[in-house]
Image: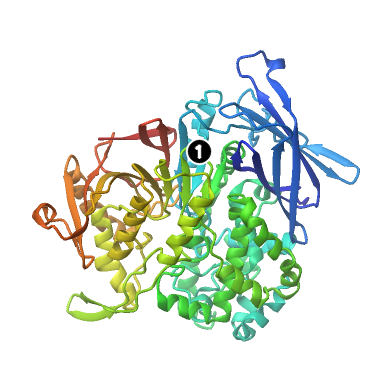
Amino acid sequence: MRIPFLLAGPIIRRTEPTQVTIWLATSKDVHIEAVLYTIDAKKEKNNKYHLFHTKTFNKTIRAGKRMYIHLIKISPEKSNFPTDHLLGYNLLFTNGNDIFDLGDLDLLSKSNPDSIVYDEWKFPTFYIQEKLPANILYGSCQKPHGKGDNAFISADFTTQAHHSDLKKRPSALFLMGDQIYADDVGDPVFPAIQWWSDLLIGENTDAITEMEPLLKHEPFLSSINKVQSRQYIMSNFANFTSGNAANHMIRFGEYAVLYLLTMGPSLWLAHDSIPTFEELTDNNNIYFMYTQKNEKNFQKELKQHKKRYEEEKSEVLSYLKTLAQTRRIMANTPTYMIFDDHDITDDWNISFDWAQNVYQSSLGKHTVANGLSAYLLFQAWGNDPENLDKMIDKLSPQLPHYLRECRFEENWIQRIIRYERWSFVAPTKPRSLFLDIRTKRNYELQPKPIRVINKMEEEQRAAQLIGEHGWRINTTILKESDWQKGDRLIIVSPTPLYGVGIIESFLKRFVYPLRILGIPVHYDLDFEAWKYNEKSFSNFLNHIINWQLDQCIILSGDVHYASAVKSQVSLNDQKEMKILQFTSSPIRNMSFSGLWGKLLKIPVWLNSFSRKHRTIYRSCNEQYTFSTSRKVYSRNKKLKWREEINYLSTSRGSVILTDNNIGLVTIDNEEVSNKLLQFTRQKEEVRFKD
């Protein structure tokens, strides 16, 4: 088998008039030069492409024995890149005496179904939006063995349909968390990760026992790389709380390969990496809790493994057919990414106890550091290269040590876990502030009483998703950009500021307390929300109002449904602001299935119809107690803030959508519109309206 040269990419990352950034991963160390063209769509074929003189700076990190991560920075030789004008690019690779380009890799051929070009264009294209409408694709939650059709297909079709019409073509792609599910890896994908990790990364996997000495003992020593082997390890040694951790990523190389397997089709095309269930059992590559000595339980476990494997294999095979379109949309659209919990592990930093338990565990802190190191290379670096180059320079000399020892040194672990600048401003028009809601939390230690049926307990209060220190960092990041107070602003918050009340209430009253009390509830929806901590919600409003925004557009994902909300907020000092909250989730991970999903779906739909054309009056007093009483809203003078909330209806009549989707928000001067793109055998659009 021949290892592909191009492992992932190219992906258009941060684009602005002074610099364009392209990310890619290769299996060989090469020098890369970018060639940029301005394209005149109105001219005849031979006169469309005009060479634009540029300078290329290529920064490369060797992340494994056969894996090189490149960030290519392209700047104009004179003046700036043209804005609101179609640009095309090619990449020239030099390896010794060999010189080749994207065409030589068969990525520019119209006859290749895995090509990265649209229709008649010779090259992948993009544009730097300035005065034209901003057309922003946004979404989250993409799992290879998730249920339903991949909404990326519809995003790709939309770009194809408008590839020459920049007024309608997507100008940016926002991926708002859970780009990978590191804690919930499908059985058919896990063997591919082990195979490619050994081939591309080459970690000394035997040394993993030095990171966690408990792994020296059986059955862990001989089974840790087998399918379904890690739930006990991650729960008891790493102190993670994911209920789907049987194939959890641990090593840096595993996180890295999972990115490669989800960013495009290269590795899947190079090697048929999905074995049959029988091949896995014949080669002793599946972990069994029961041995064959306990025949009855062994056979039952075998049957469960096979059933799950075949179901997941069917979903993964369906997913693989869409990866060429996933790669194409990212090769032609400036792409910005922020993490949520599953990019590292489920429930990441959810509570004070979680953080204490995990970071005092050797396996826990090493796994989080491995995941963040991969996130830095595969997602974060291209968001804000000028700021993150310093972290990349610190990571690069750590990698040789990691490959030898299968663990990073303690100074790097502490540096990346405590890093404070994951938030960033994307240079869209209007500007977009991406919020880190995982690592800048504030935990309140005062307990909160709860009652579940007849059982009364005290629980930890929900975390403030961003504490005061985090908000100071966000304000500094905004000031360092060219955004000015009073300018319109898009805020990307991985979890919504405004959710759908009945879903949040269901999770808060039933799922969240049961999990806190140690009762396992297997439910695929996340249950973190801004409003679970009333002070956190209020601080969000205070900060964005103090930024003097006349209108704030919030884009979110995470919650596995889509919705749209309008709110008019006023503080006691008469400051006012309009908020538009658009939520799109999941791209591919439908969750309204199974017992809990079915139980929730009925009241959700009933509740959603009751919210149509209805204004909700909500207020917050000095004690951070929320009220939806119209009387309190109107008469109480001592309120921190008050707001009028309206849920927008879809063209299908509901205020939420639970099928896989990706959002497309259009901002044209004062007009803002939002729709959802879906793919169920054909492209569909669902619009929100007042």
Name the outermost residue toward the front. 573
For the point 38% across and 60% down, the residue is: 524
| Colour logic | rainbow
Above or below, 333 relative to 95:
above
Residue at the (40%, 51%) spot, across then down: 590
* 304 vs 546: above or below: below
In percent of width and height, residue 563 lies at: 32, 45
Q: Residues within 10 Å of mark 1 (few under 14, many from 20)?
A: many
Q: Is residue 60 above or below residue 198?
A: above
Q: Is residue 307 visible?
A: no
Q: Quadrant of residue 662?
A: top left
| Camera-side residue of 542 and 304 | 542
Quarter of the image for residue 504 reads bottom left
Q: Residue at x 64, y 38 (%)?
A: 18
- Residue 124 in picture, x, y percent from top left: 65, 32
**Of all residues shown, which one is farthest toward the right?**
97
* Residue at image location 38% in from the left, 52% down from the top: 560
Q: Residue furthest top?
A: 44
- Name which residue type carries label 1: Ile
Give the labeled residue for mark 1. 153
Residue 27 falls left or right of residue 354 = right
- The C terminus lies in quadrant: top left
Any part of residue 185 in sight: yes
- In this rendered view, identify the residue nearer to me: 395 or 622: 622
Q: Secondary structure beneath disc 1?
A: helix
- Toward which corner of the image does residue 373 lie, by quadrant? bottom right
Q: Position of residue 588 (x, y in %)?
A: 46, 49
Can you give x and y, in whole percent of width and height, for residue 644 in the image? 20, 47
